[in-house]
């Protein structure tokens, strides 16, 4: 090989090495498809990262559940095989206790109250509480309010007695649905459509965009506004991967996640309205005259069982006292 070619090759190799040290492509996962507001939020975060680092840090979003269920992707994040994931707060409940707080039934009085609490130090404390479990909580995304959908209308707690109701894989959710007098069946989101079709479950609960996007409205037609939880979405980063980053890059990533929140909330509001039109056109019935108090009054045992530590009691109290 001529000296010239050897020199060129050596230069190319050293450039490639320098770039690989500098360039960082983060891998993110989300259960939903590209048009869903959570994925739009992650994409915004990726844009901000690229803009602010002039393309040095980028983010690839594996959407549509390409990398598995929320539980599976959380395991990949734990071992650093995946850098970050957007999940609901619920699958975090059994991992990181404080995430139970924003998932609790009837804690937030309104979406505004939820925003106020999660945008305050309370939200930051909950996010930070996952560090010790191997997850760096970066941001909360919107997920509206969750309500029950079933083959018959639900107007009060008596109507759900004995109902086989799918829940997310969280002990708190099992207890919550037990407290309603229904039978909780935990399973991943991707199995719910078939479970409802085959009668394995009679009902599920979620926000309108999830009810629409998962096509559950094709199977069960009554969406009754119980609005029993405002469990938010969370963006969580792998602590293993995080600890390998420079403090500057950690700061840039944390800020990009926070700054993607307004775009996610806007996308959420738009999708919420669009999804409502789709489910109505598809024959869904929205039941609005629900006696929410009958549900809220039955939730005492859930708080007693899960709000146990002084820290959790303090968080709940501060949320409740927030005007
Ligand atoms: C949705 C949420 C998903 C998933 C799902 C569920 O609202 O966006 O991440 O947690 O609920 O019920 O499993």
Image (spheres, helix red, strand yellow):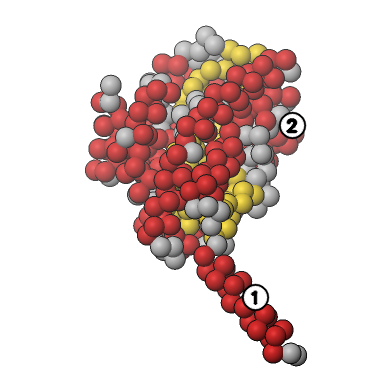
Residue drawn at point x = 64 percent, y = 75 percent? 12
Q: Is residue 69 visible?
A: no
Name the image quarter holding the C terminus: top left
* Few, some or many residues within 10 Å of mark 2 (<14, 14–19, 20+): some
Dot 2 lies on which element? helix
Q: Quadrant of residue 302?
A: top left
- On residue 175, which mark appears? none
**Label 2 to label 1: alpha-carbon separation:** 58 Å
Along the horizontal axis of the image, is 199 left or right of 294? Answer: right
**Residue displayed at 52% across by 27% down:** 266
Q: Quadrant of the N terminus?
A: bottom right
Residue 276's image quarter?
top right
Per the rendering, the mark at residue 12 is: 1
Q: Is residue 269 above or below residue 4?
A: above
Locate residue 209 relative to residue 52 in the image: left or right. right
Q: Which residue is disc 2 drawn over?
A: 197
Q: Secondary structure at mark 1?
A: helix
């Amino acid at each position: 090989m001529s000296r010239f070619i050897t020199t060129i090759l050596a230069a190319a190799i050293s450039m490639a090495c320098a770039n690989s040290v500098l360039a960082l492509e983060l891998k993110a996962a989300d259960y939903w498809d590209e048009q869903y507001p959570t994925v739009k939020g992650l994409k915004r975060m990726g844009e901000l990262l690229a803009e602010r680092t002039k393309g040095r840090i980028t983010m690839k979003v594996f959407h549509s559940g390409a990398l598995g269920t929320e539980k599976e992707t959380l395991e990949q994040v734990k071992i650093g095989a995946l850098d970050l994931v957007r999940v609901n707060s619920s699958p975090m409940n059994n991992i990181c206790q404080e995430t139970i707080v924003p998932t609790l039934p009837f804690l937030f009085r309104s979406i505004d109250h939820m925003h106020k609490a999660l945008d305050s130090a309370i939200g930051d404390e909950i996010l930070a509480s996952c560090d010790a479990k191997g997850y760096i909580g970066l941001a909360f995304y919107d997920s509206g309010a969750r309500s029950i959908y079933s083959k018959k209308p639900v107007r009060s707690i008596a109507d759900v007695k004995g109902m086989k109701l799918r829940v997310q894989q969280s002990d708190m959710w099992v207890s919550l649905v037990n407290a309603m007098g229904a039978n909780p069946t935990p399973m991943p989101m991707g199995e719910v459509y078939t479970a409802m079709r085959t009668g394995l479950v009679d009902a599920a609960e979620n926000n309108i965009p999830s009810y629409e996007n998962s096509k559950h409205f094709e199977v069960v037609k009554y969406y009754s506004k119980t609005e029993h939880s405002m469990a938010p979405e969370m963006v969580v980063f792998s602590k293993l991967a995080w600890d390998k980053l420079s403090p500057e890059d950690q700061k840039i990533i944390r800020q990009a996640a926070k700054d993607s929140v307004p775009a996610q909330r806007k996308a959420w509001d738009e999708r919420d309205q669009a999804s409502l039109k789709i489910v109505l056109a598809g024959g869904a019935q929205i039941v609005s005259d629900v006696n929410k108090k009958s549900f809220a009054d039955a939730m005492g045992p859930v708080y007693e069982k899960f709000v146990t530590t002084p820290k959790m009691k303090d968080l709940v109290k501060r949320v409740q006292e927030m005007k």
